[in-house]
Image: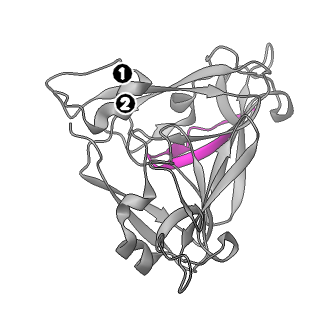
Amino acid sequence: MKKLATAFAASMIAGLVSAQVESQNVVGYNTVTLKQGFNMLACNFDGVGGTTGMSLDQLVPGTTVGLSKATTADNSDNILIFDATTQGYATYFLYYATKGTTTYNNRWVLNATTPATNVVLKSGSAFWINIKNTTDLPATFVGQVPSDSSKTLTLKYGFNMIGGVFTADWDPNVLGTTYWAANGTRATTADNADNILVFDATTQGYTTYFLYYATKGTTTYNNQWVLNATTKAPDNFVKVGAGVWYSKKAVGNLEVPVSIPYSL
């Protein structure tokens, strides 16, 4: 390892698209703002030292100022992990007790005696964090910037909670129209096509993009992600640090290849 960079500003991480660094072992950080209510976040890092993923305690340290801790999920902040296979959630909460079972104080747990140590999120994984605090909270993700030449997102039938597999914004349209024509479900309306739903923690609502195809009329954006027939989705609309829903209409798995968007 030639050099270990331990302090990247969020803007610099996104700027890795054009940056050159001295080592493939780069530790970076990305700071996001947590709002009261639900926030859809993503893990865009590998584990430091080349481990396969990151635990919840590594992703969102329980000592982060402003997080709510308690002995029950109802009174503390929650992290919800979605399972695309079952289309259901597992809920973990930030534990703290002043007496009794205090072993897992300031850690994410399933219950007072079961920590979330078996929950490991890889780059490209996403999750909800439900914040009780009414004040905006800065939260910093720290991890190893992925250096693989390419990574793969696996999408299942139904809903998938995903993020970018690299430490940068991601634009699904860069895969090209040929790829999406062969692998996506396309239509003239969102109801009949694959969707990507981007959550806004401020409004607690979604913006929906869909995979467009028309046989007549407005065909300019055929096989591309759009907001509507005449409005293409913004470039790089899957932001670093943010999770999104991918709603897959076709039965079966889809392996989505993503090439590294920066040089290390």
Residue 49 appearing in the image: no
Q: Secondary structure at mark 2?
A: helix
Q: Find disc 1 in the rendering and name its residue.
A: 8
Q: Quadrant of residue 65?
A: top right
Please provide percent x and percent y for residue 119: 56, 44
- Residue 123 magenta-highlighted: yes
* Number of on-image labels: 2
Residue at 21% x, 35% y is: 24
Quadrant the N terminus occupies: top left
Does the CB distance between marks 1 and 2 fall below 8 Å? yes
Q: Residues within 10 Å of mark 1 (few under 14, many from 20)?
A: some
Residue 121 appears left or right of 259: right
Question: Which label sits on residue 13?
Answer: 2
Residue type beneath disc 2: Ile
Does residue 98 appear to the left or right of 105 in the view shown? right
Boundaries of the magenta span: 112-128
Residue 47 visible (yes or no) = yes
Q: Measuring from the top left, give residue 174's x and y in whole percent.
A: 37, 59
